[in-house]
Image: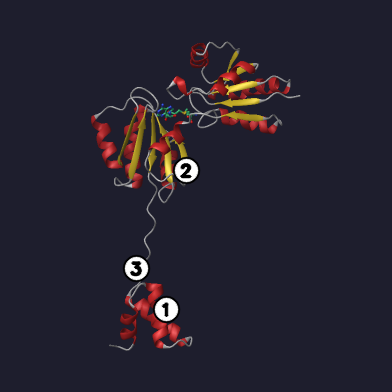
């Protein structure tokens, strides 16, 4: 019988955020697949855990993924960890989950910290509907196309960003969405220098021109405003009154119904219809 793959979330800064179930899973699995084995060894050492590690990262995911699948099919169980946070969110774990699904291997999650969701919760922006956009491409054309596709996005948007690219990204966000949109910039979540700045995109761009960006960042950006209703002119409203009267309504009833639909006062429409 095939073994199972466990997606184990690890702390995004504060080691105390590793869950007891994550520790138990590390103890029970046959091996751990880690994005950076050096980072994961430190984590395991901190909890006094010893387990065989294999490396699984962006540039070896095809080859290493195949080996991991073969071991899972042979009955071994594996815990997948990324450098930090929830595996498969903006990291190569996504690919391994696809391979497991294709091979009928069960995948279970040991959930925990995720930078995107943590930043959204802290943002004070609407969290009922949101979109996760990950990292913007460094290739100019793809980046522009990505931002362009979001111009009319009404949901709150979440972006990951590296410190050395932050200023360029804030400038591009300002160009795409305008400077007045609200943004929440989360830095070093759960770490000593954790900071959440809630400001406009323009203010954030100015702030980080003064204060050099350091650490890891999540940007949460307000969605586009609801398009305002096209304004109804008195002429349009009167046309509605006459159309309703032509359908058989009395002038008074037609004025009342058109008033409800257009926001004009019914007396105004009635008098205007009479040419007063
Ligand atoms: N899978 C991880 C997750 O969803 O939590 C994220 C992996 S992604 C390769 C790494 C990015 O997550 C960083 O570049 C940064 O944008 C964000 N991130 C991770 N830890 C963070 C932290 N402590 N504070 C702010 N952002 C963080």
Residue at the limit of the structure toward the front, as seen here: 20
Q: Which corner quadrant of the figure contains ligand 1?
A: top left
Residue at x 25%, y 36% (from the top left corner):
206
Q: Position of residue 275 (x, y in %)?
A: 30, 88
Residue at x 34%, y 86% (from the top left corner):
273
Few, some or many residues within 10 Å of mark 1 (<14, 14–19, 20+) = some
The residue carrying mark 2 has its beta carbon less than 8 Å from ligand 1: no
Compute the Cα span from label 3 to label 2: 31 Å
The residue that label 2 is drawn on is: 131
Q: Position of residue 6 (x, y in %)?
A: 61, 25
Q: Earlier in the sequence, mark 1 or mark 2?
A: 2
Q: Which quarter of the image is occupied by the C terminus?
A: bottom left
Few, some or many residues within 10 Å of mark 2 (<14, 14–19, 20+) = some
Residue in the foreground of this view, choosing between 39 and 195: 195
Residue in the foreground of this view, choosing between 119 and 82: 119
Q: Quadrant of residue 204?
A: top left
Q: Looking at the image, is 141 positioned above or below residue 269?
A: above
Residue at x 53%, y 15% (from the top left corner):
37
In the drawing, does residue 37 fall left or right of residue 177?
right
Q: Which mark is residue 257?
A: 1
Q: Quadrant of residue 212?
A: top left
Few, some or many residues within 10 Å of mark 3 (<14, 14–19, 20+) = few
Q: Looking at the image, is 83 positioned above or below residue 251?
A: above
Q: Which quarter of the image is occupied by the N terminus?
A: top right
Compute the Cα span from label 3 to label 1: 18 Å
The residue that label 3 is drawn on is: 231
Q: Position of residue 208 (x, y in %)?
A: 27, 32
Q: Which mark is residue 59?
A: none
């Amino acid at each position: 019988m095939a073994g199972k793959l466990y997606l184990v979330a690890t702390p995004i800064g504060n080691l105390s955020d590793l869950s007891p179930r994550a520790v138990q899973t590390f103890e029970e699995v046959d091996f751990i697949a880690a994005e950076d084995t050096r980072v994961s060894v430190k984590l395991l050492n901190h909890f006094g855990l010893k387990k065989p590690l294999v490396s699984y990262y962006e540039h070896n995911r095809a080859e290493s993924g195949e080996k991991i699948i073969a071991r899972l099919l042979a009955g071994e169980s594996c815990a997948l960890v990324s450098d930090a946070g929830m595996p498969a969110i903006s990291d190569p774990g996504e690919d391994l989950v696809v391979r497991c699904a294709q091979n009928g291997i069960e995948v279970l999650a040991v959930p925990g910290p995720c930078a995107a969701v943590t930043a959204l919760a802290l943002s004070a922006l609407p969290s009922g509907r949101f979109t996760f956009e990950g990292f913007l491409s460094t290739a100019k054309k793809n980046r522009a196309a990505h931002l362009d596709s979001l111009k009319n996005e009404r949901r709150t948007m979440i972006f990951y960003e590296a410190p050395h690219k932050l200023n360029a990204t804030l400038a591009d966000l300002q160009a795409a969405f305008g400077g007045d949109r609200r943004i929440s910039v989360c830095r070093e979540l759960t770490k000593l220098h954790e900071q959440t700045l809630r400001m406009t995109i323009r203010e954030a761009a100015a702030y980080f021109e003064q204060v050099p960006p350091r650490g890891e960042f999540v940007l949460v950006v307000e969605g586009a405003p609801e398009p305002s209703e096209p304004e109804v002119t008195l002429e349009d409203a009167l046309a509605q009154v006459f159309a309703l009267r032509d359908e058989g309504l009395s002038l008074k009833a037609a004025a009342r119904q058109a008033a409800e639909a257009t926001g004009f006062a019914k007396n105004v429409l009635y008098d205007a219809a009479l040419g007063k």
